[in-house]
Amino acid sequence: MAVRCDPKPGEPGNETWEGASWRAGGAPTWLTGSYDPELDLLIWPVGNPKPDYDAAARRGDNLYTNSAVALRGSTERSYGSFSSPRGRITIGTRPRFGAGGSTNPFGTEKRVLWANRNGFYYVLDRVSGKYLNAAPFVRQTWTEGLDAKGRPQPLSSASRNREGFLLYPGYVGATSCGHPVSMLR
C-alpha cells in the first residue's frame, strides 16, 4: 500500500509526528476494508498509533492512525483520510465501518458509516472524505464532544480531580473487533 503510518521526513504526514516520534510510531490495520468499484476507492481502517498507552512519546496528530484511509484501487495512491481521535488520545479505536449510501429525492449519497470504538458513530462523505456528522452511541466521558470537523474536544480542567474519574467507553472500546461491517450499494 502507498500509505505509511510512520512516514519518514519528506513523506506526506511526517509533519504530524512531532520530532522523531515517527521512528517508533506506526499503526496496524485491524480489519478488511471496503471497495467501491464505481469510485475505484478502497476504504481501509487503520488502528491506534504506537506506543498505544504512552502518548508522550508520539505527540502530534499522527496522520493516518485511528482512521479510515481511502486509496485508489487501480493505483494504490492515497485519496484521503479521516482520523479520530487524533494526537494523544487513545481509546482502543480499532475502526469498524462500512461504506453505504442513502437514497433521497435527489439521488444516492455515498457515505462511509463508522461505528468507532471511541463511542461515536461517524458519517463521512465517501466521495470527498469530509466529515459530515457524528453522535455518541454508548456512554462516553473521554471528551467534551466533537468540533465542526469531527475532532474531539479536550476535557475541561473542571472535570479533573485528585480522585480521578472513569473514562468511558474504556480501553476495550465501544465495538467488537469481530467481523467487518462492509456494505456497498
Image (cartoon, rainbow, N blue to C red):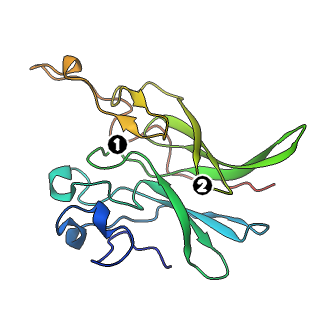
Please say if 126 is above or below 2.
above
The residue lying furthest to the bottom in this view is 75
Asked where in the image residue 14 lies, by quadrant, the reply is: bottom left
Residue receiving disc 1: 91
Q: Which amino acid does label 1 sit on?
A: Ile
Residue receiving disc 2: 129
Q: Left of 108 or right of it: where is 27? A: left
Q: Nearer the viewer, residue 83 or 47?
A: 83
Q: Name the disc covering residue 127, or none.
A: none
Question: What kind of element bears circle 1?
Answer: loop
Residue 181 in the image, given as x and y percentages of width and height = 64, 52
Question: What kind of element bears circle 2?
Answer: loop
Residue 19 in the image, given as x and y percentages of width and height = 17, 65
Residue at 56 percent across and 37 percent down: it is 121
Q: Is residue 54 at all visible to an observer of this figure? A: no
Q: Which of 150 and 161 is in front in this view?
A: 150
Residue 141 in the image, given as x and y percentages of width and height = 35, 25
Q: Nearer the viewer, residue 98 or 7?
A: 7
For the C terminus, the quadrant is: bottom right
Q: What residue type is labelled 2?
A: Gly
Q: Which sits earlier in the primary sequence, circle 1 or circle 2?
A: 1
Q: Which of 182 and 112 is in front in this view?
A: 112
The residue lying furthest to the left in this view is 162
